[in-house]
Image (cartoon, grey):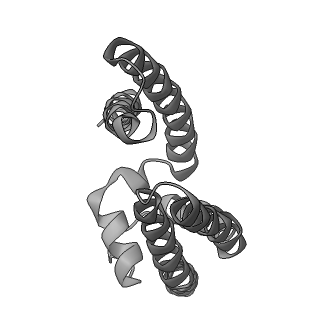
Amino acid sequence: MPTWAVGVVMAVLFAIGWFALGFVTTPGLGLGARALVSAFVGALYGIGMGFWLSRSRRGYGATASRPGFGRAIRRGTLPEDVDGAEWRRALEHHQRQYRPLRWAAPALYLPATALAVWLAVTGQPVFWFGAAFFFAVLVVTCVTTPRVLRNAEAMLADLDRREGAQRHAG
C-alpha cells in the first residue's frame, strides 16, 4: 500500500476514535464541533504519520516492503537468496530505529501510565483504559525490542559469514 494511503487510513481511524472518545471526555460539545475537531486532529495525525512512514520506508529501501523481511526479523533467520547489500541496509536501519526504544519506551510509557492512573483515580474512570493501554504497550515494547535487536544482530552476522564465504570461494 502506498505511504499516502496508509496515512489517510490512519487519519480516518484516528479521527473516528477521537470522535468516539469525545462523547466521554467532552460530552457538552455538539456533534458538528466534535466532527470538525475530530477531522482536524485526524488530519494532523495522518500527515505526521505519513511523513514519518515515508521517511522510515526510504531508510529501509525496497527490502522491508517484502513480506519475508518481517518474518525474517521475527524468526532471526536470514533467507537463503538475499541481496546482501539491500538486506544489510534494511537491517542496520531497523537497528537504528529500535535501539532508542530501550530507553524511550520506559521514558514515554511509564509517565503516560502514571498520568492515566492519576486521572482515573481523581476524575473519570475511563482513563483506566488508557492506563491499561500504555502499560501493555510498555510491556510489549520492553519484551520485543531486545529480541528484535538480537535477531537483527544475528542476521547481520550471518550476512558477514556469507560474504566471507563468497570471498573465499571466489
**Which quadrant would residue 94 be assigned to in this image?**
bottom right
Q: Determine whether 124 is above or below 143 in the image.
A: above
**Which quadrant would residue 103 be assigned to in this image?**
bottom right
> How far across and down, in percent of the image, does residue 170 sit?
51, 79
Is 1 on the left or on the right of 78, as rendered? left
> How far across and down, in percent of the image, does residue 106 sit?
66, 73
Residue at image point 71% right, 68% down = 107
From the viewer's side, name the closer residue of 10 and 100.
Answer: 10
Is 134 on the left or on the right of 17, as rendered? right
Q: Determine whether 58 is above or below 136 in the image.
A: above
Is 149 on the left or on the right of 30, as rendered? right
Q: Determine whether 114 is above or below 1 in the image.
A: below
**Which quadrant would residue 32 be assigned to in this image?**
top left
From the viewer's side, name the closer residue of 104 and 108.
Answer: 108
From the viewer's side, name the closer residue of 125 and 151.
Answer: 125
> How far across and down, in percent of the image, does residue 51 sit?
55, 33
Residue at image point 35% right, 31% down = 19
